[in-house]
Image: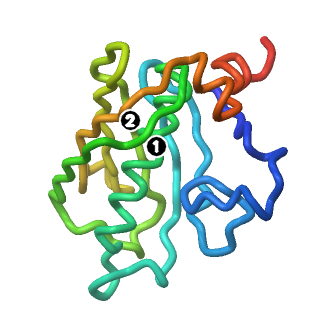
Amino acid sequence: MRKIKNIHLTDDPEIYQCFGCSPYNEFGLHLEFWEDGDELVSFWNPRPILQSYPKVLHGGIQSTLLDEIAGWVVYVKCGTVGVTAEMKVRFKKPLMIDEGEITIRARLMEQNKRMALIESRLINSSGIVCAEAELRFFLMSETDAREKYNYPGVKAFFEEE
């Protein structure tokens, strides 16, 4: 696995407040990502404040985790920026907040000029998939991504080798 650099860490902390990945958002999830072959992976420990029923991770937070990693797949695997167009989530088993670290995985399934299909899943500490999603992202052209959204290109996400 190789670590994916968060290219936003040099942004103004007052502006970079992404709920999913900003370390500056005190209420956020503070996700970090690694490339593991064709997949992106993140490891996360839930907090009790994010539960719905006692000890169950709230479905909205689960959906956010599934969506956030997919957005980073767009950055790293599609080579651009995009926005979520559609998301279908299947909650398969309650994801408990007191059973340890959660693994989040995602991979690019299909891509064309304007759309990407991404699959993501949440895996509990016992290796059981508790939720999975199929997401469609509208993709920006790389030119628009660079000019309008300061996208630095795929190489910027990795240390020089």
How many residues crowd mark 1 within 10 Å: few (<14), some (14–19), many (20+)?
many
| Percent position of residue 83, x then y | 43, 40
Figure check: 100 above or below 110: below
* Quadrant of the snapshot with the N terminus: top right
| Percent position of residue 53, x then y | 27, 86
Q: Residue at x 68, y 73 (%)?
A: 26
Coloration of the structure image: rainbow
Secondary structure under tag 1 reads helix
Secondary structure under tag 2 reads strand
User: Hey, what amino acid is under mark 1?
Assistant: Ile
Q: Residue at x 74, y 63 (%)?
A: 24
Q: How many marks?
A: 2
- Residue 69 badge: 1
- Residue 106 badge: 2
The answer to whether the residues at label 2 and label 1 have Cβ atoms under 8 Å apart is yes
- Residue 38 badge: none
Mark found first going from the N terminus, 2 or 1: 1
Q: Quadrant of residue 56?
A: bottom left
User: Hey, what amino acid is under mark 2?
Assistant: Ala
Q: Which is more toward the observer, 3 or 18?
A: 18
Q: Which is more toward the observer, 77 or 159?
A: 77
| Percent position of residue 100, x then y | 46, 65
Figure check: 55 above or below 151: below
Figure check: 69 above or below 25: above
Q: Residue at x 33, y 58 (%)?
A: 63
Q: Residue at x 48, y 59 (%)?
A: 101
How many residues crowd mark 2 within 10 Å: few (<14), some (14–19), many (20+)?
many
